[in-house]
Image (cartoon, rainbow, N blue to C red):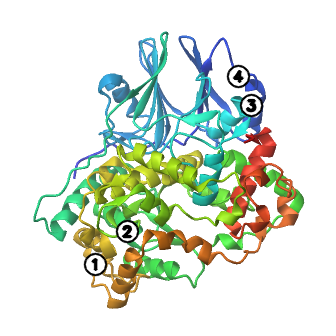
């Protein structure tokens, strides 16, 4: 085992602003005051040429990771980051010495982060290798930030992006470079923003995610060993830097069990937690495994959070707005504080949480058959979670699908809507992962340093061309667990079989029928399963929601037939948009 210097640092995701010194945003002073009230205080003010940089502390008052060289060059790291197996800020002097924009590579980096690097008279801004963390820019191209909420406060947007609103409500996130408003966009993945006396420009660098195929004749064991070895580049430095402080989200399924196997392999002693009540299968499986392995387990039942007095709901929603940077994936920002408090608790006593999102790079995530496909088929299969009756006439299905297809092509560099089967697999990390999981990863950094091992390029590389017969039914991932830790693989699972054991006929048949369903039929699934209106309970009940928005939905009613929205989750997402619209005086562009 290689030796690492143990990590002694806890770097949460604070945020930055960059703007022209001679033309600061009009609302800057008001914004700074409101952020301080929300827990984000100014850490440093820096200048590079004609630009001013303001770096904010995280919501717990911790400073950003910072290093200044003797010649006044500097580097700021925001979020979770390891470089050459060392955590920030210890790694920053080496990173600054080695940095050159024209040959920069993410090969030696881990984590979800943003970097600000000054060299000479130039400032460089970039993010992680997948592009999970986003850098936002206003329409004029003179304000930049890694905080979406900051951009809404300072860029003074006026118009919702209708396509983005439709994507958010139907898919829980926004894809591509657009955002919820027209006047704010994000920089492309694997780009470096350069700011100097010549202006602002983007330099595109090669993605660190490799897409090589496997050798002909490779067996399941050979492929499992290859990808287990790739994962060592992720888990060895994590386990060695944080041996006693990792807090692992553990359901006992494929993704979390593979993480646990890797952590134990490198000597880490993680504490585990699982969501649910005592009757949930995940809880029972996690308890069985943790008892047998002698590992601590916490069971978290967020449904036990007591309701608030309605008058307190305004303040609670304001806290969520700041904590979740304006919006979060898949779920509304409205609750009684359970999500915010849970994410905060993960970091008690300096713990470093690990999350297994995107672990299905080793499985057939889209449940599509093993043959060439198209962007249209992927959209019908997975991105058609809507009933047309919930939209007003402003929704045009052809336009929606065309925009989604364009974002997919851009994400994987495809020049056609006709896709090979491996290109479909690429969409999972580079489309779903970058824009859905990535948003969640970036938000989580606001609560403290957190790692998502399967978002790392070292994990994603070369998974797109793994044969589907290895990915199907979890064969590959189960075998990877078994090759690393046979004991962990042998425990029961809520799938009904040990993860490295034979798959029952019933499970194989069910999976086969699911993958063979035509895309046109899967497109209808959501509307067929949401024929009845779900109750608006909890934080979505009128007595709460009316405290923070106009329940007539004067803004979003232009896009959605509110009374015909059956899904409670989608109703909550529409309410989130209404809340943002009313807060920032946004409107929907007239036809």
Towards the viewer: 343 or 405: 405
Q: Which of the labelled discs sits on residue 31, or is there none?
A: 3
**In the image, residue 167 lies at what x, y percent?**
59, 53
**In the image, residue 410 lies at what x, y percent?**
42, 43
Q: Is residue 555 left or right of residue 422?
A: right
Q: In terms of secondary structure, where does tag 2 sit?
A: loop
Q: Quadrant of the C terminus?
A: top right
Badge nearest the viewer, 1 or 2: 2
Q: Are marks 3 and 4 in contact (CB under 8 Å)?
A: yes
Gap in angstroms between the C-alphas marked 2 and 4: 48 Å
Towards the viewer: 233 or 518: 518
Vertical order, 171 against 202 (above or below):
below
Q: Which of the labelled discs sits on residue 368, or is there none?
A: 2
Q: Residue at x 49, y 73 (%)?
A: 521
Q: Is residue 158 left or right of residue 476?
A: right
- Residue ID for mark 1: 500
Q: Are marks 1 and 3 in contact (CB under 8 Å)?
A: no
User: Which of the marked residues, 1 or 4, is nearer the chain's N terminus?
Assistant: 4
């Amino acid at each position: 085992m290689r030796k690492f210097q143990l990590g002694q640092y806890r770097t949460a995701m604070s945020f930055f602003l960059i703007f022209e010194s001679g033309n600061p945003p009009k609302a800057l002073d008001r914004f700074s005051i409101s952020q301080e009230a929300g827990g984000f205080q100014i850490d440093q003010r820096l200048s590079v040429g004609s630009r001013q940089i303001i770096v904010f502390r995280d919501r717990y008052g911790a400073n950003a990771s910072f290093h200044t060289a003797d010649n006044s060059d500097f580097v700021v790291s925001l979020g979770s980051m390891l470089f050459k197996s060392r955590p920030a800020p210890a790694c920053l002097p080496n990173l600054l010495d080695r940095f050159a924009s024209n040959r920069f590579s993410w090969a030696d980096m881990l984590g979800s982060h943003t970097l600000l690097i000054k060299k000479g008279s130039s400032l460089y801004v970039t993010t992680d290798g997948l592009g999970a963390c986003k850098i936002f820019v206003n329409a004029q191209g003179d304000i930049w930030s890694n905080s979406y909420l900051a951009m809404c406060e300072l860029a003074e947007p006026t118009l919702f992006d209708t396509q983005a609103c439709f994507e958010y409500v139907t898919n829980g996130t926004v894809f591509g470079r657009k955002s919820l408003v027209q006047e704010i966009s994000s920089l492309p993945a694997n780009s470096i923003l350069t700011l100097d006396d010549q202006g602002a420009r983007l330099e595109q660098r090669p993605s660190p995610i490799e897409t090589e195929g496997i050798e002909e004749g490779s067996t399941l064991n050979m492929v499992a060993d290859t990808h287990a070895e790739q994962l060592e580049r992720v888990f060895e430095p994590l386990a060695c830097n944080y041996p006693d402080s990792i807090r692992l989200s553990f359901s006992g399924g494929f993704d979390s069990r593979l993480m646990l196997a890797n952590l134990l392999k490198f000597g880490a002693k993680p504490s585990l937690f699982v969501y649910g009540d005592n009757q949930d299968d995940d809880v029972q499986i996690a308890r069985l495994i943790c008892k047998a392995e002698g590992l601590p387990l916490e069971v978290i039942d967020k449904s036990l959070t007591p309701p608030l007095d309605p008058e307190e709901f305004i303040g609670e929603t304001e806290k969520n707005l700041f904590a979740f940077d304006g919006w979060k994936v898949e779920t509304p920002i409205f609750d009684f504080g359970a999500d915010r408090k849970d994410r905060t608790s993960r970091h008690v006593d300096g713990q470093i949480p690990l999350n297994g999102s995107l672990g299905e790079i080793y499985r057939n995530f889209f449940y599509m058959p093993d043959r060439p496909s198209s962007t249209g088929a992927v959209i019908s299969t997975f991105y058609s979670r809507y009933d047309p009756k919930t939209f007003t006439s402003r929704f045009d299905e052809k336009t929606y699908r065309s925009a989604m297809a364009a974002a997919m092509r851009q994400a994987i560099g495809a020049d056609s809507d006709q896709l090979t089967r491996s290109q479909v697999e690429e969409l999972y990390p580079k489309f779903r992962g970058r824009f859905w999981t990535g948003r969640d990863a970036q938000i989580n950094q606001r609560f403290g340093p957190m790692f998502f091992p399967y978002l790392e390029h070292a994990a994603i590389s070369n998974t797109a061309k793994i044969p589907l017969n290895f990915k199907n039914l979890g064969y590959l991932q189960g075998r990877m667990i078994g090759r690393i830790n046979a004991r962990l693989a042998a425990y029961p699972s809520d799938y009904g079989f040990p993860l490295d054991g034979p798959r029952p006929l019933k499970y194989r048949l069910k999976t086969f029928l699911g993958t063979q369903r035509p895309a046109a039929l899967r497109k209808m699934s959501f509307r067929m399963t949401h024929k009845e209106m779900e109750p608006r309970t909890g934080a979505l009940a009128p007595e709460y929601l009316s405290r923070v928005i106009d329940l007539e939905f004067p803004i979003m009613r232009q896009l959605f037939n509110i009374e015909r929205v059956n899904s409670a989750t989608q109703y909550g997402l529409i309410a989130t948009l209404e809340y943002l619209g009313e807060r920032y005086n946004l409107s929907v562009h007239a036809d």
